[in-house]
Every structure is written in structure tokens, then in C-alpha cells.
Amino acid sequence: MKRFLLTLGFFLLIFVGLLYVAPVSAASPPQSNDTCLFCHSQEGFTVELPGGETLLLTIDKSAFEEGVHGSNQLACVDCHTDITGFPHPERTYQTLREVSMHYYVSCQKCHSEQYQLTLDSVHQRALAAGNTNAAICTDCHNPHYQHRLTDPESGAVTPTARVNIPKTCARCHSLIYGEYKESVHGSALTDGNPDVPTCIDCHGVHNVRGPQEGNFAFHNLTPQLCARCHTDASIMDKYGISTQILDTYVADFHGTTVVLFEKIAPDQPTNKPVCTDCHGVHSIKRTDDPQYGIAMKDNLLTTCRRCHPDATADFPDAWMRHYIPSPDRYPVVYYVNLFYKILIPLVIGGMAIFVLTDAIRRLMDRRKGAAHS
Amino acid sequence: MSKDKATYVRFSLTQRIEHLVMLLSFTTLALTGLPQKYPLARISLALMQFLGGVENARAIHHIAATVLMFSTIFHLLSVGYKVFVLRLPMTMLPSLQDVRDAWQMFLYNLGLRKSRPQMGRYTFEEKFEYWALVWGLLIMGLTGFLMWNPITSARVLPGEFIPAAKAAHGAEAVLAVLAVLIWHMYGVHLRRFNKSMWTGKLTEEEMLEEHPLELADIKAGVKSQRPDPTTLRRRQRWYFPIAALLSVVLLAAVYGFVSYEETAITTVAPPPMEQVPVFVPQTPTPLPLPTATPTATPGPAAALTWESYVGPLLQLRCGTCHGATAMGGLSYLTYEDALKGGENGPVILPGDAVNSRIVIVMSAGGHYGQLSLEELSQLEEWINDGAPEK
């Protein structure tokens, strides 16, 4: 009897509890953004973190609503999931970084595809190794004011977004950005040219690859990387740039080695140069740039000497500069090729004719001999 | 039957060893070289894989080339011995007769002649192959040197000669391999399996068919005789020192050939082109700070009033929520608003700080926008004073 009463009392308690809780939770649905903005739209709303940094708590309401999240009716609490009302739960953040690290995991709720890609990135690997400076979602994308970066129909990165990519990476890679923006690619991008590569065209986006991750795969595959654009006549023809650069490179001693090497030992260091070893990495200049261009004889010699310290002034001519030999350019090579283009068919053809007639004659002789006996 | 039994020495043991060395080095050179000429072909890749990579293949190619150079030196010296010491007839030299033989053979093959031309010790086919090899060795040796020692070569020759050497080396290799596959295969394997390069001998029947004039010479006893021992020794006495000197010179040349130049750094990648540090964050843009930061210090001389102290203090500390936004209906914007209180009634009871809600909440702590102890005591004093506006 006693036990029955206890059980009944227990269930009654739960029932009352439910009665009490249910209307409350119904009355406060996912916090509307207005509730948050009530306070968080105030200008200069900051809090000092124990680490000494200042965390800005102000949200620019109109900028948020113009952004891709705001215009898609996302609620503050969709990302700030741990905030359900006021007062907010107690915080133990020491630094701004800890705040970002706490909240960036929210992104994967909607952007899981991109998040999965980031798991295979140089940033993620650095993060896993304990480097909290490594970029996370919110370092590149501003979750509050981000505008769409891709065209909703084609999925392609919008021209405005493309121009902004290097500036985004520059937040952490400022010196590299300094090199890039002076380069033939970077300066053209700044001028609004959509044909040139931005950071992500070589390093990838989300699954960002770096060149020095304990192996040389990135280095060894550089020719294929550059060739993606540089063998595309639809881009190169506009600038009068040869699309033969890969073929001529592969035909050369360096390129042959790298191609064979890359296929057999893709992640091992090769001692032969790829594109960037001569042209530069981020600071690539026009080859005819009067100061830095490697088509300038002195510059080319300096470049050769990086690996061939004893090279003399004539040595750079051993490299055919991506030209296909012709009577005007590299005539010796051209005429050697021409000589063999004639000699080989002549000799081999002559041999074939002789061998064939000899064989036929011998077969006929043998048949005749057999018939006679 | 006797025709089958009788055999004639065609190649000496050293000649057969020379051939074997040549066979091995030539094949090795072709297998390690051609994949470099056609790096994109699948078979090249398979070969490279088998050889353990392009660097290995190059090392093997270089070794085989060196072996071939040694073999060539040996051949030169032994030819010298035969020509200058033994004074054997130079049967390998090409002559007009070879052209005639070739032409007649061709006519016979076409059915325009009744019989095959009769040939001697070396047929035009063999001479063609031998001299093609000499030409090939010269070209390959020269162009090989240019590629092996490009910096040295570019000191003397125009730099362009190096890619030209590479072009010639590759094309010549194709020519040589095709020639061996067609000419040599047919001539000594398909037409008749000629084993003399291994056994050293030919049967009389084979001799009669391929070298009838030589056979006739042998039968007639015209085949040249070895010189008598005294003459032989006299000739050897001056040939051997010259040959020794020549060997030293040639071996030194080979040593120079293979070791003169280290064209590139051997195992490490080129020095990085770019050496700027990777992680160099920009200085962050300073945060927008609160627009107004009134410092609410209690005026010790002035009277403690809403206007002089409490109003600005509450607006600063609590205004974020209890300002214009009036969270919970409570606003400290004006004196009237403050005294009116919020949805749950007044928070300031003039004259009764202890029971004023603002003091209770602030004393308990945990509320957003906490007052300091000093500020709280000033607030309490003000309320106990009757919460004067001015």
C-alpha cells in the first residue's frame, strides 16, 4: 500500500511537472533573433575575457539580415545552440580563440560536406597536432555577415568572391599574400581578371593542401597543376601564351624525370625542378618582366645556378624554354630531329624491303627445291 | 655427309665474349634508355617500376654505357693487334664490291638474276651491321658525353648542343634497336639460325652458302698464314707498349667521361624557391569600442543624487538590457522609469535599500552587468537617502 502510494505520488509529480514544463517550452520557442538582438544590437557591446582580449558582442542587425544566413532566416540559436535564454550559461573562455573553437563546430550541422573536406586539410592536421592558430571555418567565413560565395545555379565561385579569396587567406598568410599580389596572377586578379588562379585553385578549398606536409606529392604534381590552365587554349589564347608548356617540359630532361618519378615515387623528393622551382611559387612574374623575368638571360642563369652552381653563361641555352625547336629557334635541335626523321624511315624502310624480298625469295626457292626433289 | 661434319672456325672465344658483352650492354641500354625517351608510355612505366625508378634506371644505363666503352676499347686494341701484328687482311672494310653484292642480291631476290652473289669472309649484310654499330657507338658516345657532362660541354659548345645531343641520342637509339630487330634478327636468326657466335664454328654447308669465297680461299690454302715466331715477337715488341699506353689514355678518358661532372645536386630537391614564413597573421582590425564610456565616479563633495551619480551608473552598467530595450519592462533611462520599476513591480524603494529589488539582485550576484561592491554601497546609500533625483 505504501509502495503504491509512493508510485502514484511519483507519477503525479511527473504529470504536474509536465503540465508545468510544457507550456513554458511552448511559450518560448527557439529564441527569436529579436530576443537576442534586443541586447546584442547595441553598439560597443563588449566583454573583456580573462585573457585580456575584448570580445565584441554587438551584431549589426541589418548586415546580418543581408548576409546569407540572415536572409535564409537562420536563428542565432541555430548556431549558438547552448544559449536558450537569459541569463546565459556561465562561460569559461579565456581567449577569443576559445570562443571560436567552441562555436565553429556548429557549422557542420548544415555544411557537413565542406566540413568533411576540411578533415583532410593542412589546417585540420595542424589543429590535430595542437596548433590552435590553424584556420577553422569561422576564420575564413564570417558566420554573421557572410554573403553567398557561389552562384546558386552554377555552383561556381562568384567573381567578387574570387577576388576576395587571397585577402581571406592573407589574414594568416600575410607575407605570402604580399608575394602573390605582386605576381602576374595576383596583380591581374586585383584588376578583376577572372582567368588567373587564386589561392584555392592550387591549394584547394576546405581540403586545403600545403606543399610541405612531410611528403613531396604537392611539389611533384605541380606540372599537372599549372597545366590545368596553361594547356587550356580557351584561356591562354587571350594572352598569347603557349599551351605547349607541359609537352615541352615533359619532353625535356627535367620534365621526363619528374613525370616518371611522380608516377613511381609520388611522395619522394626528386632533385629535378618543377614549374615553381624556376618560375617562383607565389611571386610568379611574367617571363619577360624586365627585372624579374626568367626569360632575361641573367635571370635564367641565376635560376639554373640554384641547382647547377657551376653553370656558365651558355649553359641556360641547354634549356629550350618551352619552345618547340624550329629553324628559327634551336635550329640545331630542329635539324637533328629532321635528319633522323628522314634517316630512320630510310634505313629501316630499306632494311624492311630487303628483308622482305629476301624472305619471299627464299620461301619460293625452298618450294621450288621441294617440288624438284 | 662430310660436308656437314667439317667445321670451320668463324669466331674466336674473345670475339664471342665481346659479342656477349655487347649483347648484354646494348639490351640494358635500350631497356633503361627508351623508357626515358617515351616517359608517358605504359610499358615505360612498367619498366621503370621494375628497375626501381628513373634514378636507378639512369645509374644502370650509365654502368652499361661504361661497360660498352670498356668493350669498345678492348675491340680497338684487338683489331690493332690483328692489323699491325698479325697483319691479317682487313676483311671488314667496306668496298665497292659490297655495293655490287647488295645490288645483285636485291636483283636476285626480285627474280631479276639467276644466282646469288658469291661473298667472302664478311658479307655486305655483316659489314653493314658492323659499320652501323661503329656509327652508332660514335654518335651515342659523343651525345652521351654531352648529356653526362652538360656544364663542361656548354663551356666549349653552344648550350643548344645539349638538347640536340639528347635528340640525336634518342633517335639513334630508336634506329639502332629497330635495325637490330629487323636486320640482325632476320640475318642470323630467322633466315637461318646461325649459331656461330656461340659455338664459334660454321659447317661446310653453311660456309658454302654464306661465305663461298672464303671457303674457296681456305681450300686453296690462300687463307693468310700466321707470321713466323720471330716476326711476331718483333712486331709485338713495339705494339704492346703502344697498346698499353693507348689503353691507359683511353681508360683515363672513360674515367673522365663518367666522373668529370656532377651535373646537379644528387639527392635533395632544389632549394625552395620561396622562403617567406607561412603563418604571419595580419594585425586584427581593432574592435569598435563602446561609443561612450562615462566614468561614474562618486562625487565625494557633491550630493549623491540620480543626476550626479546613480543615473549614469545604472545606464552604464545596466543600460544594455535595461536601457532603451527595457528588458522585463525595466528601464533606467530616466528617473521616472527607474522608480516605476519593471513587470514585477518597483525595484527601488526609496528609504529602504535592504528590501529594494535592485539591491537584492545585485547583492546575490550572478546577474549580468554586476555592480562593484563600492558602487553597490553608493547605490544603497542613495536609496536609504530617499533616492533623490537632484
Image: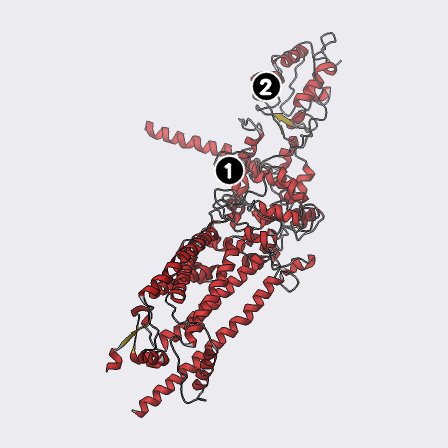
Instruction: Determine the chain carrying the residue at label 2.
Output: B
**Quarter of the N terminus of chain A within the rendering:** top left
Q: Is residue B45 visible?
A: yes
Q: Is residue B175 above or below residue B99?
A: above
Dot 2 corresponds to which residue? B361
- Residue B279 point in image, percent of width and height: 58, 36
Find numbered disc 2 in the image and state the secondary structure of the residue it sits on.
helix
Q: Nearer the viewer, residue B311 or B12?
A: B12
Q: Is residue B38 visible?
A: no
Bin the neighbour count of mark 2 within 10 Å (Cα to Cα): few under 14, some 14-19, many 20 and up.
Answer: few
- Residue A241 point in image, percent of width and height: 66, 57
Name the kind of residue labelled 1 in the image: Ala
Q: Nearer the viewer, residue A58 or B244?
A: B244
Residue B251: image quadrant is bottom left
Q: Is residue A138 above or below residue A260?
A: above
* B75 sits to left or right of A328: left
Name the kind of residue labelled 2 in the image: Val
Q: How is the image coloured?
A: secondary structure
